[in-house]
Amino acid sequence: MAGEKVGGKGESELTPEQLQETGAKTIEAANSLEEYERQLREQDLNEHQIEAMMERYKEAHTKQPEKREWRNVVEYEQRLRSEVDRNGNPAFSEETIENLKERFLAGEDPRIPGAEERRAAIEQARLEEQEQRKARAEILLAGRTPEEYFAAMQRDIDKLKQEIAAMGNVRYGDPESQAAHERRMAEAQQDLQSMQEKVDLVAEVSGQETPEEFSPVGGGLDENMPMGGMASEVGETPRTESLENELKPEKGYWEKIAAYAEERTPGSMMSEEEKTEQAVESEERKGLLARVKDKLRGRKGFRRAMVRALAGMAAVLSLSGIMAQVADAANVEKIKGRNPRVEYDAGEVGDQISLTEAEQGLMDQINQSEVEEDTSDGIELGSFEELRARGQKYYEDINFMAMEGSYIGDNGLRVNLAEAVLPVNPDVDPNSPEAKNFKKSKGNYGYSREALYDIQDEDERKRVVIDDMKLALAKDPLYLATKLATSPQILQACGVDESIVNDENKIRASLNLYETLCGEDGAALQEALLGAVIEALEDSQTEFDFYLEYGREGTSYIQMIDRNGRMDDYRNIRPAMDVKQRDGAKQLMVTFHFADGSLSQHDTNLGCGYQVNVVPETGEVKVTVVNEAGEETTPFVQPQEVVKKTTPEDPEEPEDPEEPEDPEEPDDPEDPEDPEEPEDPEEPEDPEEPEDPEEPDDPEEPEDPEEPEEPEEPEKPEETPKEKDPENEKKVVDDGGQTNPNTQTPNIDENTTPGEIVTPGNENEENQIPTDEIEGDMTGTYDVTEEPNIEENNEENVAEQGIPDETAGADEQAEAQEAQEAANESEEFGSMSDDELLDYINSL
Amino acid sequence: MPKEKVLSEFVERMITDKGGEMTVEQRTQLAGSLSEKLQEQIEQAMLRMLSDEQLVELEQMLDAGVSDDDLERFFDEAGVDFSRAAAQAMTEFRKAYMEVEA
């Protein structure tokens, strides 16, 4: 190869000596070429690069003989004078030329001084440049393959093209704004050019052709659009890369940030005069800055702007992992939001900037994170219409009507009581806990949610609860009524009648609320209530405290109005109260914090859907709501496995002055709703109760000594603000207000010291009801007085466990009084045989 | 959260680069503290990008109870490259941290 050229032009004219010299030079060149190639291969260059560099080397060496073809001093002098330095000036002075000529004439071979060095220097410079380009390409590649890089750049270029095209559609009337806009467009064009150069560099260094996609083939942009022509130079490129390929960590983290920060000083859009002004901050400006900063504290709008700034930075830098994700999403956001005044043409650019599914997901992630990071100042409920719209949207989102069991009531109410009819569902195993937990006349709020208690990941558990609870509330209007009856703030926001809002008896309030829902405008109210409770559940301050309950408490249940009717007929059910003794039942306390500083709490039993718990007998919320005066009763503190004392023993220090609520009970008989209570006629069926086999267990309770958990109880007095006043309670009973004829937990009567903690007797294993005798669920909850196994067609007297005060007539109250007395005697039950007990109960 | 991720990654790298022995707890505490300060610096840098007129306008808007959406729009339309301001603030913050003697 080199030899051929050596013997080229002028070879025949060489003297034998010259030919010999040329041959030697050729061999020398060949040897050098081999050495050069060896060196190149040591430098980890690819074949393409090596060939290119060797070609240049050969070119340089093959010219050498030609330069030596001066046959006489004249030609040598001409060659010397033709040499120039890098600035184009003569390379040799006259004196040097004369000296060299003398040496030539003296038979020496002075050649062209410095020529070799220059060639070597040039070659070295080429190598260095090559190395630099290679290093730069490595930075650009950041561990990716060239193909991956091209795909990523292709996407960025696509986006930038769209941005430029969109910007081209904008024109400002204000000259200054227009000028700034044009500068931004020019910068965008520079960015585009820079991106193209990077692609070329990587292509060259990697020995690949510039991908077809980057060739100027036009593309999706309309070249007639402003800027479209320029954008088309880059070409439209299809998306081929998954986001995952962008998540590889990059090198040069700090360098990138620093370079980005210095690339253009912030405020580069400002004039020099403005920059100078801003550089020297006046005291006035400092004050202004401080004030504004202070006023911006906690503002979501500013926080979002900051998030966008960071995302935009990450977008440019594509720093790594999650930042690349942010960057990707932020790029899209930038396209949409860089200039809000841009009016996109939905038919052209608008289509092009539509988000891919992945991008939308990332945007949602960012938006979600913004919501999460915002520290809520408490729940702020919007207008009725806003809340209603939210509820409507949720129904749309879950495609409510597509759910099995969904139907629309005659007043438009959305109903799905599929879970409530569980026990009559032939597909359900009658021996399953759910089915056993169910009674013919009582609806089930839903499947057991006790599994939630055991979810270890608290965030995950919270997420599951929120989703599940929203769904349950959307499906079951009765559950919606009972849950929200405990939240006057929500009721008020939804325009519910004040008598319901202010009713301390939450079971009664839920009954009236449910009736309202079943009324003419019930559907709209249902939507608004659902929207409000979704707002509350999703608020970042809302607390979900899981705990075990060992106390006695009232709890709501679904009561059938017509026992022969359908359980899933929303007009055939209503909320009522039962009294349960919890013995380690898994429960959940939900606390809503409102912006006005108030809160509402909802104690729910997980064993039966999310049935709402209240104070027994009174139906009050178990934990007091903070009043507007800011007298915050200690909110519920998650006891986590801590035994809660039974409700009657809860100290009521702050509530005592409010106890006059109890006197309301005597008013119940005057309540116009009393006649509507269906429980009244059911009373005669009480005698069917004797079937209860567990009754004998109750009397054992008083025998219970001190509970081992009691030492933990001292915390309770501060946590539970509302406590029944034993004296007052007794008064209510004496007055006939106590309508619950169930055998009371005996130790209540033994509790002579207010606030004293008395542990339910059944906590001692020896006193517990044998599990095989427990009727219904075995989840730590059972009726305070056993519920009978109702024979087919027999009616259960739910009034005895229903809303106490409203349902009781004078006769009933007398009966209740007797029952209460019987309860007081229940200690004797322990010595009775089953038959004796049955006879005794029948005698009642 | 992306914002926290950006800041925490930045701070974590910064701490790693500077080195120094510390317990996991100390490091966590330091990272949290630095993240907070960094966020403040970024906020400050963003505000400093606004002209006096813009600051006055912003203050008036805040006094008038501007909504968060409008507030966000204000920053969007301010014509300022806040991303670069954030980058500069972060760079300066790092420089200051690296120069501080442990």
Image (cartoon, coloured by chain):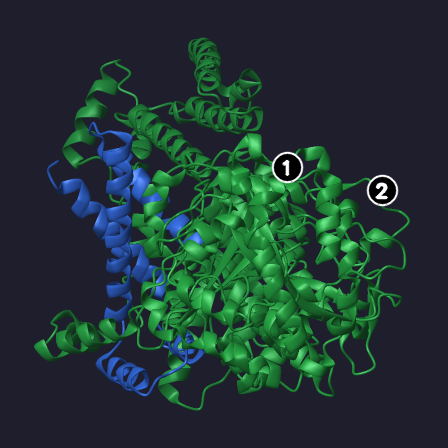
Q: Nearer the viewer, residue A602 or A835?
A: A835
Residue type marked 2: Asp
Q: Is residue A822 above or below residue A814?
A: above
Apparent side of residue A711 relative to residue A683 in the rendered image (left or right):
left
Q: How many marks?
A: 2
- Discs 1/2, front: 1
Residue A272 appears at what percent x and percent y?
21, 74
Q: Chain of mark 2?
A: A
Relative placement, left or right, of A619 versus A311 is right
Instruction: Identify the residue at image location x=20%, y=72%.
Output: A275
Query: Residue tagged by mark 2?
Result: A429
Visible residue check, residue A353: no
Q: CA distance from mark 1 to mark 2?
A: 24 Å
The chain letter for the residue carrying disc 1 is A
Front-most of residues A199 and A334: A334
The image quadrant where one finds the N terminus of chain A is: top right
Residue A615 higher or lower than A250, as above or below: below
Q: Amino acid at mark 1?
A: Ile
Residue at 62 percent across and 37 percent down: it is A831
Chain B: give its colour: blue
Residue A785, image x, y percentages? 65, 51
State which chain is coloured green. A
Residue most extreme to the bottom: A173
Q: Which mark is residue A769?
A: 1
Pointer 2 local density, CA inside 10 Å: few below 14, some 14–19, many at least 20: few
Q: Earlier in the sequence, mark 1 or mark 2?
A: 2
